[in-house]
Image (cartoon, grey):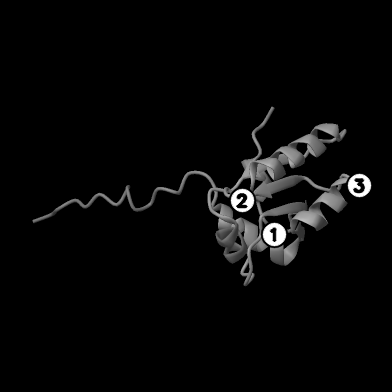
Amino acid sequence: MSSKIDFSRSKKAKKGIDFETNLKVAFKTGKIIYGKNQVLKALRNNPFKMLVIANNIPQELETQFNYYVSLLKDKPYIYKYKGSSLELGLALALPYWVSVLGIVDPGDSDILSVIPKK
């Protein structure tokens, strides 16, 4: 008696990327600046490829980041993280809240693949 088992569902690859895993890899192997004051100070020199903003930051702060990015020649992509600032800090394995972070160098991660192609 032969029975066929369909393993095709278990072999399908996940669509997209795991953002939290890539964020942790970028934090360990690349260069990331986090914190509102540090990111605003570094944003004047335009070093970022991407900004990650927590879901629960105040609207004024998000407007301020959008304004500063609009003034730059090479505009970094702003990614709205789905979790709160506490969850963003925990995704980086940090014991405190992180409201915004800027990715200067992604290192070995594929985190910049979330940027839509133009």
Mark 2 vs mark 1: which is more N-terminal? 1
Which residue type carries mark 2? Ala
For the point 66% across and 39% down, which residue is it?
Answer: 115
- Mark 3 lies on a secondary structure that is loop
Query: Outermost residue toward the top?
Result: 118
Circle on res. 54:
2
Q: Do the CB atoms of the residues marked 2 and 1 lie less than 8 Å apart?
A: no
Would residue 29 be found to the left or right of residue 55 on screen?
A: right
Mark 2 vs mark 3: which is more N-terminal? 3
- Mark 1 lies on a secondary structure that is helix
For the point 60% across and 57% down, which residue is it?
Answer: 85
Q: How crowded is mark 3: few (under 14 residues within 10 Å), some or many (20 or more)?
A: few
For the point 74% across and 37% down, which residue is it?
Answer: 66
Q: Calculate the distance from the C-alpha at mark 1 to the C-alpha at mark 3.
A: 21 Å
Which residue type carries mark 1? Ala
**Residue 37 appears at what percent x and percent y?**
80, 56
Judge depth for marks 2 and 1 and give the one in front.
2
Check disc 1 and report the residue beneath it.
Answer: 26
Q: Relative to residue 79, is residue 107 depicted above or below?
A: below
Would residue 113 be found to the left or right of residue 39 on screen?
A: left
Q: Relative to residue 47, is residue 96 depicted above or below?
A: below
Check disc 3 and report the residue beneath it.
Answer: 45
- Mark 2 lies on a secondary structure that is loop
Judge depth for marks 1 and 3 and give the one in front.
3
Which residue type carries mark 3? Asn
Quadrant of the snapshot with the N terminus: bottom left
Q: Residues within 10 Å of mark 1 (few under 14, many from 20)?
A: many
**Residue 62 appears at what percent x and percent y?**
69, 42
Q: Calculate the distance from the C-alpha at mark 2 to the C-alpha at mark 3.
A: 22 Å
**Residue 104 appears at what percent x and percent y?**
80, 52
Circle on res. 75:
none
